Amino acid sequence: MYSTISESFNNTNWNYLRITDELINSRYKWVNVSLPIVDNEHSWAHEHNIIRLFIISRTFLSKEDAVIWMKTKSIYNLDAIHLSLLDHYCCPKINIQDDIDSLIDKANNKSLLIFIQLVLDRSLLWYDPESGLGWTGCFQEILRISSKKLQRKSMQEVSRSGNLEIEGVDFVSLEDYTHVFYKFKNLINGLERGEVYYDIQVLSKQVHGALLKSMQLFFEDSYYCHILLPEIDWERKLNEIIIQETDWCKFQLSRLFNKE
């Protein structure tokens, strides 16, 4: 995941890929994208490079397609980490008739906890509310700590609690999509004590909504993007990307089903 890989590397040992704004815009002809410059003098430079890799790789159906295209653009220094990220970030075509809510309802809690981590991680690649602050954001830290705790905790012998205390409400409005990060944090902390503090299926559906909101914020942030389409055409394009990102979520759930 982005949140864990960004911690494992730093600006001095990351293998940087030459993914320029021009290359990204060649894949997004309907918008002018201008991402933060990757300056490896800054401690967060490798994170910016990973974000560029995500933004461009999600336009491909498969890792193989992405690699072929990158080689035509003289990007030859792909390593095992890059290939793993490409495989994870690409948006494959799927043939799953069930809608996302139905798939979530069918999944077990263990799969949904992994799903929540994956989707929240992707949402931060689209748009991190704390980006540009110059330090590791608390949302990344929530995902890192939660991932480590989940590796130590089994879903067995967990009881349901009627209590719900959402941390962070002093800083983030409950109407804003970021509340799902704090709910997930509380959920994992509850699991450590053997209690479920929130309906995991409901949270999974809210997390899907957070991903879509994060994507929309990215494209509608004038700092990053300038939409080149009339409003009605932009609405159609937005709906197209919503379908792609939802299909990515459905694909992740199908992978998790195969492991149950």
Image (spheres, rainbow, N blue to C red):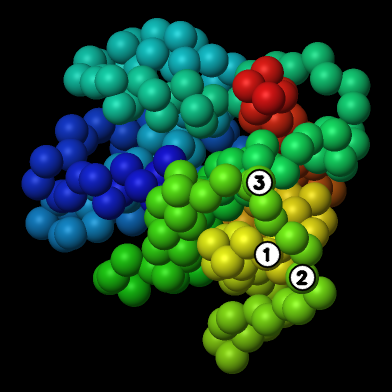
Q: Nearer the viewer, residue 79 or 202?
A: 202
Q: Residue furthest front?
A: 157
* Cα gap from disc 3 to disc 1, whole angstroms: 10 Å
Residue at point 46%, 63% (across, down):
142
Q: Quadrant of residue 21?
A: top left
Q: Quadrant of the N terminus?
A: top left
Give residue 250's position: percent from left, percent from top: 74, 30
| Neighbours of disc 3 within 10 Å: few (<14), some (14-19), many (20+) | few
Of callouts 3 and 2, which one flags the residue occurring earlier in the amino acid sequence? 3
Give residue 32's position: percent from left, percent from top: 51, 46
Horizontally, residue 136 falls left or right of residue 201, namely left
Image height check: is 127 above or below 49? below
* Cα gap from disc 3 to disc 2, whole angstroms: 15 Å
Residue at point 90%, 27% (across, down):
98
Residue holding disc 3: 156
Which amino acid type is shown beneath numbered disc 3? Gln
Residue holding disc 1: 195
Residue holding disc 2: 161
Give residue 216's position: percent from left, percent from top: 66, 55
User: Do callouts 1 and 2 mark residues in contact (Cβ within 8 Å)?
Assistant: yes
Helix, strand or loop under label 3: loop
Image height check: is 152 above or below 63? below
Which amino acid type is shown beneath numbered disc 2? Ser
Horizontally, residue 127 falls left or right of residue 174, namely left
* Cα gap from disc 1 to disc 2, whole angstroms: 6 Å
Which amino acid type is shown beneath numbered disc 1? Glu
Residue at point 36%, 20% (across, down):
83
Q: Nearer the viewer, residue 148 or 208?
A: 148
Of callouts 3 and 1, which one flags the residue occurring earlier in the amino acid sequence? 3
Residue at point 33%, 56% (across, down):
36
